[in-house]
Structures are given as C-alpha cells and as structure tokens.
Amino acid sequence: MIKIHHLNNSRSQRILWLLEELGVEYEIAFYKRDKETRLAPESLKAVHPLGKSPLLEDGPVKIAESGAIVDYLVRTYGKGAFGPAAGDDDYNTYVEWLHYAEGSAMLPFMLSLYVGRLGEAGAPLGPRIQSEIVNHLSYVAKALAEKLFLVGESLTGADVMMVFVLEAANTGGVLAHFPNLKAYLERMQSRAAYKRAVDRGGPYKLGA
C-alpha cells in the first residue's frame, strides 16, 4: 500500500488530495512542525536525508518532491485521467504547469516568508518580492482566464500543483486582486476529494 509521510500545513496535503481524487488506498505517517521554529521534526530525516515532506513510498518506490510524486501517481494510477497522454497536444503545456508551480511560482512566496522574518533588515527587498508575486499571479490569471482548469476540461496534476501556490497567495489576501484565481481556488477546495484529504490529513492552514 502507498504510504505518505505527511507534515502538517505543508505541500504533502496536495498529495493526499490527489490520492483521494484517484481513489487509491493509502496510509499516512504523520509529522508535526516544531511550534517555535515551524520546521519539520528531525524524525523526517530518518526517511529522507533532507527531512522534507511529502515523501511517497509505494513498495520499492520511494519519491520525494511533490511534482515528481504527482507525476508518478498520475502515470501509475491515473488510468488515462488527471493528465494528457504524451502524444496529446496539451501534454507539453501540462508538463510546463506541473513544474512551473514549484520551479517559478513558489519562489517569491518563499522569499516573502523568509525575508519577512528579517524585519527591518529585509524591508528593502519587500517591493521587489511583491512585484514578482503580482507578476506571477497575473501570468496565471491570464492563462486561466475563464477556464475551469489549467489544462483541458477536467482536473489534472497541474491543478493539484498550482492550488498550493494559490493557497500561499491567499494567506496574504493578494488573491482579492485576482477574482478568477480566487474563484478557481474556491472551486478546487470545494471538491469532495479535497475535503476528504483535509479530513484525513488533519487541520490545514498555511502560515499557522
């Protein structure tokens, strides 16, 4: 059976969501952030040298990095859904979004998080970071336009990856300036599988 090493309030929540969408049985190994540092516990290093979550174990397969896990789950358990086939017209667009979420879109939000902890020392970087956040959200908003999903006519791994980015954006209220992204996020969070994943994974609130 699939096992997910799951850290509260982290990217691993998106993996639980995808598993619920796929209808695949899985078990969860739970880990809690340190209340002071907000970092993952040392016990995660027993399963991966970086001590990061998510980590998937599926028999002999062990994969870290949420994008790689999403790709693996869609290819292995998707039964032709949740991502276009390699020869389809949308395939390269799908792969681009799959990697864009963590490769580019999350960077300014992570910078904002860490620079914000510097207080006044980090203040000079604030305007540049905020401009990059707006730049990326504008890009996604234009690409999504009035579509229900990023790629094609149904949920794909690209949506699963992107929703975490928008949840990060929503913690600061910036999605109020991007109504189609706000509506998209709310649609994704209203899905039955998303709600089941939160029920299984435990309380989920970024920034908490």
Image (spheres, grey):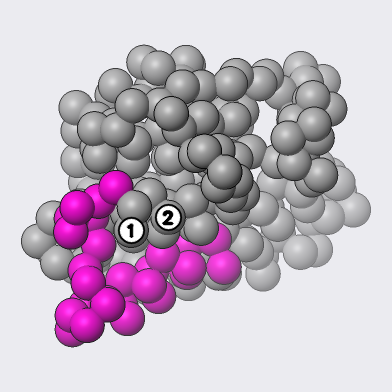
Residue 74 visible, this orientation: yes
Residue 14 percent location from the top left of the image: 42, 40
**What stretch of residues is rendered in magenta?**
77-103
Q: Which residue is mark 2?
A: 72
Q: Is residue 98 left or right of 150 when viewed as pictured? A: right
Q: On screen, 112 above or below 20?
A: below
Asked if residue 112 lies left or right of residue 43, the reply is: left
Residue 193 % position (x, y): 24, 30
Residue at image location 33% in from the left, 58% down from the top: 75
Q: Nearer the viewer, residue 73 or 130?
A: 73
Which residue occupies the foreground of this view, 194 or 183? 194
Residue shown at 43% from the left, 39% from the top? 15
The relative height of residue 132 versus residue 186 in the rendered view (above or below) is below
Q: CA distance from mark 2 to mark 1?
A: 5 Å
Vertical relation: 10 (above or below) 34: below
Q: Is residue 111 magenta?
A: no
Q: Quadrant of residue 30?
A: top right
Q: Within the image, what quadrant is residue 103 found in?
A: bottom right
Residue 159 visible at all: no
Please give the label number shown on residue 96: none
Secondary element at image label 1: helix
